Image (tube, rainbow, N blue to C red):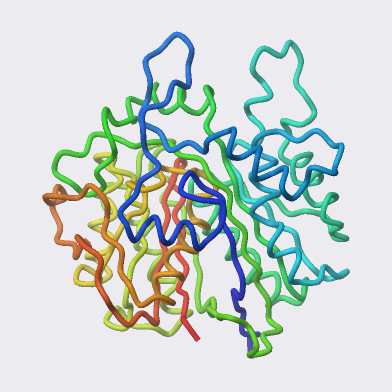
């Protein structure tokens, strides 16, 4: 019999706040971090979700002013997200450290004639792990935009396999000229605040955030909350380097596998935290996949209208917010949605609603045809 795996603690650092409570309160009020920001010197401002650097430094100095190590902006975000969890949970010889990121310290490349050591993801992971005194070799999950969801899966499967007793999963990406330029070259960036699943959607907003979760098989029953990781799956549709399968094959298979492992039927799912990037093909593909799984009537939202697309942090951050929804028995609306713009029906949440939430489906899709899903159960 497989070990039961639980998420028993988490935290996040975003433009809406430096802890979960401040983020939840801002979301209840409908606040969004998306605004115009100047990212590239010789180009106009883009709609992005960006953490205020002065506020970030002020918060960082509250906890880490005594340390003389130089940290990058992203590293400060990661350290702040993990600090509250580290204070409450013991790191042992069998504790995993898992980092989810797509670009890491990519900003270090700017105006550098040579490749800085800190730009390597392995060095970023080692620096954070060493700071907190982890004894195991860091694990890096970098699989485009499904990385945050997959990091939960990696923790679950490695603990179940007996490789580790527990795990700290941390995820983060920051806004950079490199990332904005890349998405802009695909003509994928929206001209205004993004509108997932809406008829007038025209692209994504890039965001930045860090998030952290503590995952364990040693649940004591004394935790403030517990969510069981019931099932997970990752499937690649092998369709295109940047375009999803038009039939939703990869996402459909990921959801089906995760729900089969979880032993949960479509009608048992209470809420779907979807990927919802507000690009033309992604949202349409998701709608097709959800309908193929008979999930079209389940309440669904995308958090991209609040946070933008936070790349490797998005899956973990959005999982955390979905668990907060369950704890508060509240469904949050999919911000900026007005009129359906996909060909298949979806039950998109339009306003704050009270609801009993026990089973959560979290999905993600990304470049290279990757798709991932996890099923969480509130205990």
| In the image, residue 43 above or below residue 327 | above
| In the image, residue 261 above or below residue 158 | below
Left or right of residue 180, residue 11 in this image: right
The residue sitting at 50% across, 43% down in the picture is 311
How far across and how far down the image is residue 315, in percent?
49, 55
How far across and how far down the image is residue 356, in percent?
32, 82
The residue sitting at 48% across, 36% down in the picture is 50
How far across and how far down the image is residue 111, in percent?
66, 12
Left or right of residue 84, residue 268 in this image: left
The residue sitting at 66% across, 68% down in the picture is 214
The residue sitting at 63% across, 71% down in the picture is 156
| In the image, residue 188 above or below residue 81 | above
Q: Nearer the viewer, residue 344 or 80?
A: 80
Q: Quadrant of the N terminus?
A: bottom right
Left or right of residue 92, residue 71 in this image: left
**Quarter assignment of residue 110:** top right
Q: Nearer the viewer, residue 32 or 218?
A: 32
């Amino acid at each position: 019999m497989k070990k039961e795996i639980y998420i028993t603690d988490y935290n996040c650092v975003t433009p809406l706040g430096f802890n979960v409570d401040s983020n939840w309160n801002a979301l209840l009020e409908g606040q969004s971090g998306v605004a115009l920001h100047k990212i590239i010197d010789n180009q106009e401002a883009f709609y992005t979700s960006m953490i205020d650097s002065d506020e970030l430094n002020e918060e960082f100095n509250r906890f880490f002013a005594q340390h003389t190590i130089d940290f990058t902006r992203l590293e400060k975000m990661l350290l702040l997200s993990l600090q509250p969890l580290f204070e409450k949970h013991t790191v042992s010889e069998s504790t995993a450290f898992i980092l989810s990121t797509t670009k890491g310290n990519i900003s270090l490349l700017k105006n550098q004639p040579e490749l800085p050591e800190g730009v390597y993801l392995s060095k970023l992971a080692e620096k954070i792990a060493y700071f907190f005194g982890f004894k195991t070799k860091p694990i890096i999950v970098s699989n485009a935009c499904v990385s945050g969801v997959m990091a939960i899966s990696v923790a679950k499967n490695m603990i179940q396999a007996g490789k580790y007793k527990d795990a700290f999963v941390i995820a983060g990406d920051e806004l950079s000229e490199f990332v904005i330029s890349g998405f802009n070259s695909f003509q994928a960036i929206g001209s205004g605040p993004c509108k997932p699943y809406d008829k007038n959607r025209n692209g994504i907003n890039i965001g930045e955030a860090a998030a952290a979760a503590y995952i364990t098989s040693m649940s004591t029953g004394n935790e403030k909350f517990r969510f069981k990781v019931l099932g997970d799956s990752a499937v690649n549709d092998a369709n295109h380097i940047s375009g999803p399968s038009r039939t939703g094959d990869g996402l459909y298979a990921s959801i089906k596998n995760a729900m089969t492992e979880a032993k949960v039927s479509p009608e048992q799912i209470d809420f779907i935290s979807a990927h919802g990037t507000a690009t033309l093909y992604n949202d349409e593909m998701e709608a097709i996949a959800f309908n193929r799984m008979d999930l079209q009537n389940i309440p669904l939202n995308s958090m991209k209208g609040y946070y933008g697309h936070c790349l490797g942090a998005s899956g973990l951050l959005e999982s955390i917010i979905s668990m907060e929804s369950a704890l508060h028995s509240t469904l949050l609306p999919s911000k900026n949605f007005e009129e359906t713009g996909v060909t298949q029906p979806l039950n998109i949440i339009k306003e704050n609603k009270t609801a009993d939430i026990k089973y959560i489906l979290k999905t993600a899709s990304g470049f290279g045809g990757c798709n991932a899903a996890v099923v969480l159960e509130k205990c």
